[in-house]
Structure formats: structure tokens, C-alpha cells
Amino acid sequence: MIYVLAFFLPPLALLLNGQVLAAVFNALLCVVFLVIGVLTLTPFFWLLAPAHAMIAIYMRREDRKHRELVEAVEKHGPPPNWRP
């Protein structure tokens, strides 16, 4: 659901995901790319801000997963039959 919001309202999706600086940067991207897109009549530029938001949300989610996995291994040890 956050990805749908990221497509239509990228800065709000980033704020709800806890990425304040990325939301501010994305709001600037929205304004700049909207102006460039209107001036050049190229709809491609309008998709860059949502793409940035989706990538930032995905990377944050993967970072959380990785952190949880590392914490589990530190707490409980490696899985059985694990060889380095």
C-alpha cells in the first residue's frame, strides 16, 4: 500500500515511512521535475520523483530486514548445520 501512496504522493509516503530528509528532497524533486516536464512536454520527468520514493522505501525496508536478521543471529546464534 505504501508503494501506491509513493506513486501518487511521494513526499507523504516518505514521511509516513519515517524518512524526513528524503521527503524534503523528494518534494523539491517533484517541483523541479514538474516544471521541467511541463516546459518540455515530456511525461518521463514526472515519474522520477515517484521512482525515487519507491526506491528509498524499498531500501529502508531491506535495511530493516537485514538489521532484524543480524539481531536474531546475535541473540540466538547461527542456524544449525551452518558452516562459515
Image (spheres, grey):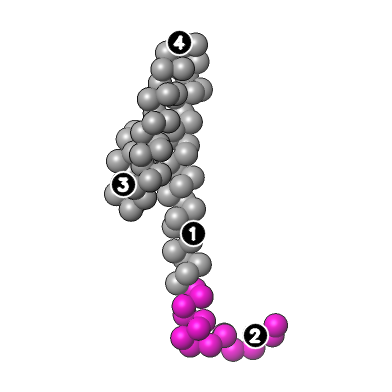
Residue drawn at x 41%, y 17% as measured from the top left: 35
- Looking at the image, is mark 1 or mark 2 nearer the viewer? 1
Measured in 3D between alpha carbons, the distance from the residue under mark 3 to the one under mark 4, in whole angstroms, is: 29 Å
Residue drawn at x 47%, y 80% as measured from the top left: 72
- Can you identify the residue that label 1 sits on? 62
> Residue 29 appears at what percent x and percent y?
42, 30
- Looking at the image, is mark 2 or mark 4 nearer the viewer? 4
83 in magenta: yes
Q: Is residue 78 above or below residue 32?
A: below
Q: Which residues are magenta?
A: 69-84
Circle 2 Cα neighbour tier, 10 Å, few/some/many (<14 / 14–19 / ≥20): few
Measured in 3D between alpha carbons, the distance from the residue under mark 3 to the one under mark 1, in whole angstroms, is: 17 Å
Please report whichever mark, 2 or 4, sits nearer to the chain's N-terminal start.
4
- Can you identify the residue that label 4 sits on? 39
- Farthest residue toward the right? 84
Please report whichever mark, 1 or 4, sits nearer to the chain's N-terminal start.
4
> Residue 24 appears at what percent x and percent y?
36, 39
- Can you identify the residue that label 3 sits on? 15
Residue drawn at x 38%, y 25% as measured from the top left: 31
Measured in 3D between alpha carbons, the distance from the residue under mark 1 to the one under mark 4, in whole angstroms, is: 37 Å
> Residue 77 appears at what percent x and percent y?
53, 88
Closer to us: 68 or 31: 31
Please report whichever mark, 3 or 4, sits nearer to the chain's N-terminal start.
3
Q: What is the secondary structure assignment of the residue under circle 1?
A: helix
Measured in 3D between alpha carbons, the distance from the residue under mark 2 to the one under mark 3, in whole angstroms, is: 40 Å
Amino acid type assigned to the residue bearing label 2 in the image: Trp
